[in-house]
Amino acid sequence: MPKFQYKGRNAKGEVVESQSTAVNRAVLAEQLIGQGITPLKITESKESAQSAFSFLDVGGWPEEDEIILFTRQLNALVKAGVPILRSLQGLRESMPNKKFAAILGEVGRELESGRDLSSAMSDHRKVFNNIYVRMVAIGENTGMLDEALAQLFKYLEAERDTSKQIKSALRYPTFIVIAMFLAIFILNYFVIPAFAGIFERSGTELPWATQVLLTTSRFTQNYWYLIIGGAVGVVMAIKVYIQSKNGQRVWDRYKIRMPIIGSILRRATLSRFARSFSMGAEAGVPVLDTLRSVSQAVNNVYVGEKILEMRDNIERGESLTNAAHKTELFTPLVMQMLSVGDETGQMDEMMREVAEFYEREVDYDVKALSSAIEPILLLFLGVVIVILALGIFLPMWDMSSAIK
């Protein structure tokens, strides 16, 4: 806990200077007033500042598997009736990741000062994202924290498995594309120039494919530094733009519309929507409050804005189904389930079925992702190979015919 140097006056008007530990300056000020001391100045001690600085070097940020394991353990402790603060202390002591343990210590101190768990976790967004904080908040508000943690564990585990499957499916095509571009660069810089002099001395009319290869080869030799620098610059510029608010929105919108993989990402997003909506409905949270939480839980800025538009339309008096239809975001299956759930009052069950359906669909499509990408990749490779073959071998055939 941070240490503070303070200066104040007691009930007799005497100046008092000392040091004490507290969660923050405000808490220390309240403690001093309760002791009859009027605080005049409160500053954080150098020792505390050094310890806070050392906190940055206690290890790496917790990985996804560590957060999932923590969620499962916390769920088991809460379900067993162990108080939250005691649970966090026990998990912190057994945590191998020092940085994660320090974060849990900070969360525990915030709980001691009177904050709730979701609010304390929201100060550490690199570990507990919007989805995590919102689900914990729903569990706290409804008294069903153990069930919220159980749902959160299943959700995080499914997200991890889906992410690993997508990365695994894209690893081979990515490697092939990178190797192909490197091969093209080497051919343009080293191989084709060796044939260029022979083709030019032959005096024959060169085919279009050969002219294209010679032009690209000369450009590569003369401006190779621009090609490499331009590629790195474009990648960095795209990365910086995506990290901006507008860029994140544009990228999130494009992701769910990409060929092949966009359909998978869209259904995964709809699964998040349905899962978090189901939790809110089951917990009895009002629809407007649930939609506000869901908009941050879907982990997609564009979809989150559409859900907030849906919430605004409901607030103006429209039905849930009409508001959802106006967003042009949901599939017919989701629309039908929303309609049935709204009419029957079983929204939690309907949304749970939607989430489970799309989770199975995403799992199946991810496994078939490599098979869908391979034909496109082979077609692209075939086109490149044909251009290279025509560009190099056609002039050689013409030259051999002329010699004969």
Image: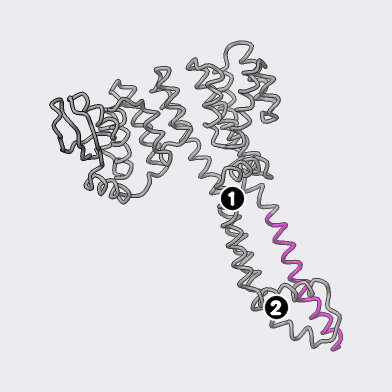
Residue 55 appears left or right of 320: left
> For residue 67, which quarter of the picture?
top left
Front residue (pair 183, 266) = 266
Q: Where is residue 66 drawn, in percent x and y?
A: 37, 41
Q: In terms of secondary structure, what is the magenta stretch mainly?
A: helix
Determine whether label 2 and label 1 are within 8 Å by CB: no
> For residue 179, which quarter of the picture?
bottom right
Magenta extent: 377-404
> Residue placed at 56% from the left, 57% from the top?
236
| Kind of element beneath mark 2 | helix
Front residue (pair 102, 153) = 102
* Residue of label 2: 192
Please state, as top left, top right, bottom left or bottom right, where the N terminus lies in the image.
Answer: top left
Residue 171 appears left or right of 16: right
Protein image colouring: one colour
| Kind of element beneath mark 1 | helix
> For residue 343, which quarter of the picture?
top right
Residue 86 appears left or right of 370: left
Nearest to N terminus: mark 2 or mark 1: 2
303 relative to 243, above or below: above
Q: Which mark is residue 387?
A: none
Foreground label between 2 and 1: 1
* Residue of label 1: 241
Q: Amino acid at mark 2?
A: Ile
- Please, which residue is most extreme toward the front here? 13
> Residue placed at 58% from the left, 43% from the top?
248
Q: Amino acid at mark 1?
A: Tyr
Gap between marks 2 and 1, in whole Å?
Answer: 37 Å
- Please, which residue is most extreme toward the top here? 344
**Residue 141 painted magenta:** no
Q: Where is residue 83 drawn, in percent x and y?
A: 28, 23
